[in-house]
């Protein structure tokens, strides 16, 4: 009898077909295996006992990175096979969104070969095998075969071809297979030769280099050379935001930061993200921007492994872009920037099809949480239990822009792009959307966007809807999307309380929301509590200038006189000149940071809040502060809290103790409001929950009070997770009352 087996899951780009062939050969089965679209099709002739044994053994020794979601079997008319072969891939036939492999860090076996002088790939900067190497960044269509990737530019030599055809070889059917003779070439300032040696010498002399990696360029310098770091800041127009640092290995990293078991596991995972760690030893003073944390990473590809083995000291490894722009993938652009800024250039001739920045993660309360989802994770799907999305595209928001497509219960999130205010970011976003729709042969039936009508992402959504002849995009309120992203991740469908705290989001009343507490029941989300509205003068500049922002809060609380700037602000508010109403918790964090003299200007998004948290974390004592909750109006008031901060400052209370008291007051207020709402399950999301103190204290106190506190883990708590929430809200019909 001839059987057909269809395997769904992450089964392409991970050595699955060679694995199937070896298993079939070990069982003396005759048949074929091939990729088709995003699945693997197997046919063989045998009896029912062989079928049961084969399907059972498929699960037992999967290649690293592979996962089987489910298996479907059918009976075919009898076919006679001669042996068991891997055959050419079939045409795409997507009944659901397929798995497409993410880029995978160099495996341990390839790393061993890389430094083995007896191996023919000794020091080969593009070493890979069937279970590691670039994937999503180099593929332009499915199935995952060499001809559908940029590796078609490189013709395999005889030795590589023999490995590719030999079923016992671990490079059997490895699509990125290459060697010194036939693979991509590495160049230092345009010259082929001892590129890594020349680069190491350059960095040791204090120079800065651009390095072409898997998903784009990095800008690199010695992390202990303050002059080089400051110059890199000037080149990137990045005044204060911390730089990521690459360490040779975990042992070296442990000299500079606290590394727990969970953090080490994240650092060594196939995605190789940047991991936020508590710093215990300084690098060059300006590397970490004066914060008590370091964004650490380990080498994840052969070029990085070779460089770190040669250099042996920590290196700043920051995204190769100018501040606010997308990561550079174009060799000409990189060369121009290097020429203009007297930088060195390490490049190669393997094309990058999809720009992929480094992912960023942390461990909180013992669980990994993604802060930026990109290389190593995209485009792994997120499956949402009990959801039936009817071919949706969600355009997300404008900050930390990320779009998503969904069909059935499966959501595919794009990589992180940045702020859509930048024209280059918008171009990269549009290009990646076009690529994803083509890659998945995706035919959308509905488009979703943020409620804010002036967002660039909303405009893009309206443009695509018109181009495809679809109805106008369905808007989803920003903070509802935040909390629904948590519900989607954790499969929550029952009643719950949802807390969304961030800097900005367009509300259903036209005000700028950002301190919102909802009760969700079925398809109804009721805005139960919100931070008291404050009239803010200064327009968009108020989000950056916290000192200016503070004056609006002090005026509102009756703590400022009517002279100087305050008189102008008062008049602007009274006449509605360049002002807006907001319930934003993020803006309140900024104002308190400025009030305490900790940080008065956001040189990068969230700087005031980050520095306020750092001050609070250093305090041994906590000054008591409290919000006031009006159960009738739903307002959360803070005038008295600001007055108490003012009195504490006048009384000489240490600033860090006041900062700690503010954080504690936020947690107590959230739990008090949750108690009034009555649900034991509380979902929290939004940029405020990037704050470790808030999250850890909320989890600790929440458990003691009988709450189950859930937050984003697979997608960022900031706006990088909004697209997932838009899809969940629409698919489940949840709207703000």
Image (cartoon, helix red, strand yellow):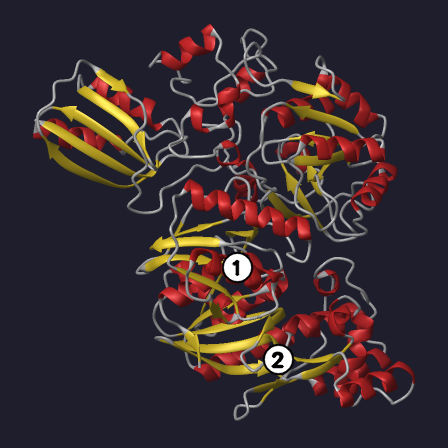
Graded by Cα atoms within 10 Å as few (under 14), some (14 to 19) or many (20 or more), the crowding at tag 2 reads some
Q: Whole-percent x and y of residue 436?
A: 47, 44
- Does residue 415 appear left or right of residue 553 in this picture? left
Which residue is at a point 54% across and 42% down the rendered structure image? Answer: 266
- Element assignment for label 1: helix
Q: Whole-percent x and y of residue 685?
A: 53, 65
| Quarter of the C terminus within the rendering | bottom left
Viewer-proximal residue, 133 or 257?
Answer: 133
The residue at the far right in this view is 564
Which residue is at a point 23% across and 29% down the rendered structure image? Answer: 42
Kindly indicate the quadrant of the structure image that contains residue 75: top left
Q: Which dot, 2 or 1, sits closer to the camera? A: 1
Which residue is at a point 39% across and 55% down the rendered structure image? Answer: 444
Q: Whole-percent x and y of residue 426?
A: 62, 52
Q: Which residue is mark 2?
A: 511
Q: Earlier in the sequence, mark 2 or mark 1?
A: 1
User: CB atoms at circles 2 and 1 under 8 Å apart?
Assistant: no
- Element assignment for label 2: loop
- Does residue 248 appear left or right of residue 13 in this picture? right
Viewer-proximal residue, 120 or 457?
Answer: 457
Residue 463: mark: 1
């Amino acid at each position: 009898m001839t059987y057909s087996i269809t395997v769904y899951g992450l089964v392409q780009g991970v050595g699955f077909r060679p694995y199937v062939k070896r298993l079939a050969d070990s069982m003396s089965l005759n048949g074929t295996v091939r990729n088709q679209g995003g699945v693997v099709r197997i046919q063989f002739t045998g009896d029912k006992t062989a079928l049961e044994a084969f399907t059972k053994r498929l699960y037992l020794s999967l290649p690293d990175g592979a996962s089987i979601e489910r298996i479907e079997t059918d009976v075919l008319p009898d076919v006679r096979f001669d042996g068991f072969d891997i055959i050419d891939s079939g045409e795409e036939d997507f009944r659901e969104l397929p798995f497409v492999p993410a880029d995978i860090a160099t495996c341990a076996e390839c790393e061993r070969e890389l430094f083995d002088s007896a191996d023919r790939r000794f020091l080969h900067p593009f070493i890979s095998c069937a279970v590691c190497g670039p994937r999503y960044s180099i593929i332009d269509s499915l199935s995952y075969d060499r001809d559908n990737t940029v590796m078609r530019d490189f013709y395999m030599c005889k030795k590589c071809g023999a490995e590719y055809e030999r079923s016992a070889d671990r490079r059997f059917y490895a699509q990125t297979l290459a060697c010194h003779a036939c693979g991509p070439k590495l160049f230092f300032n345009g010259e082929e030769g001892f590129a890594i040696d020349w680069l190491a010498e350059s960095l040791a002399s204090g120079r800065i280099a651009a390095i072409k990696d898997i998903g784009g360029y990095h800008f690199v310098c010695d992390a202990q050379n303050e002059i080089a770091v400051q110059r890199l800041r000037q080149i990137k127009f990045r005044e204060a935001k911390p730089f990521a640092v690459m360490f040779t290995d975990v042992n070296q990293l442990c000299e500079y930061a606290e590394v727990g078991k969970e953090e080490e596991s994240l650092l060594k995972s196939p995605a190789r993200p940047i991991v936020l760690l508590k710093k215990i030893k300084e690098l060059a003073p300006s590397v970490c921007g004066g914060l008590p944390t370091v964004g650490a990473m380990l080498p994840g590809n052969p070029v990085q492994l070779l460089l770190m083995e040669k250099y042996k000291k920590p290196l700043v490894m920051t995204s190769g872009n100018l501040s606010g722009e997308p990561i550079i993938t174009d060799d000409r652009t990189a060369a121009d920037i290097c020429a203009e800024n007297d930088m060195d250039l390490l490049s190669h001739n393997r094309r990058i099809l999809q720009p992929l920045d480094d992912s960023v993660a942390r461990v909180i309360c013992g669980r990994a949480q993604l802060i930026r989802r990109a290389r190593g994770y995209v485009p792994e799907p997120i499956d949402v239990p009990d959801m039936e999305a009817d071919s949706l595209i969600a355009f997300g928001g404008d900050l930390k822009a990320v779009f998503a497509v969904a069909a059935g219960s499966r959501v595919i999130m794009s990589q992180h792009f940045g702020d859509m205010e930048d024209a280059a970011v918008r171009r990269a976003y549009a290009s990646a959307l076009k690529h994803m729709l083509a890659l998945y042969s995706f035919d959308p039936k509905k488009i979703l966007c943020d409620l804010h009508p002036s967002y660039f992402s909303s405009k893009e959504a309206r443009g695509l809807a018109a181009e495809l002849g679809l109805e106008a995009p369905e808007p989803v309120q920003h903070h509802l999307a935040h909390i629904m992203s948590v519900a989607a991740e954790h499969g929550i469908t029952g009643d719950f309380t949802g807390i969304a705290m961030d800097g900005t989001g367009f509300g259903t009343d036209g005000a700028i929301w950002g301190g919102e507490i909802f009760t969700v029941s079925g398809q109804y989300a009721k805005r139960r509590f919100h931070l008291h509205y404050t009239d803010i003068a200064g327009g968009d500049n108020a989000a950056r200038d916290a000192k200016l922002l503070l004056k609006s809060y002090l005026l509102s609380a009756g703590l400022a006189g009517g002279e100087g700037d305050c008189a102008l602000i008062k008049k602007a508010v009274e006449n509605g000149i360049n002002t807006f109403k907001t319930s934003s918790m993020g803006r309140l964090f900024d104002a308190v940071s400025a009030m305490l003299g900790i940080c008065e200007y956001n040189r990068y998004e969230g700087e005031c809040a980050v520095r306020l948290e750092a001050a609070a974390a250093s305090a041994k004592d906590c000054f008591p502060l409290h919000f006031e909750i009006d159960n009738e109006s739903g307002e959360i008031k803070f005038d008295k809290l600001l007055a108490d901060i003012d009195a504490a400052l006048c009384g000489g209370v240490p600033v860090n103790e006041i900062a700690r008291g503010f954080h504690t007051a936020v947690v107590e207020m959230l739990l008090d409001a949750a108690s009034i709402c009555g649900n034991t399950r509380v979902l929290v999301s939004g940029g405020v929950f990037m704050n470790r103190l808030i999250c850890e204290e909320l989890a600790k106190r929440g458990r003691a009070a009988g709450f189950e506190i859930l937050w984003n883990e697979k997608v960022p708590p900031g706006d990088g997770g909004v697209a997932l929430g838009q899809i969940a809200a629409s698919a489940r019909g949840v709207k703000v009352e």
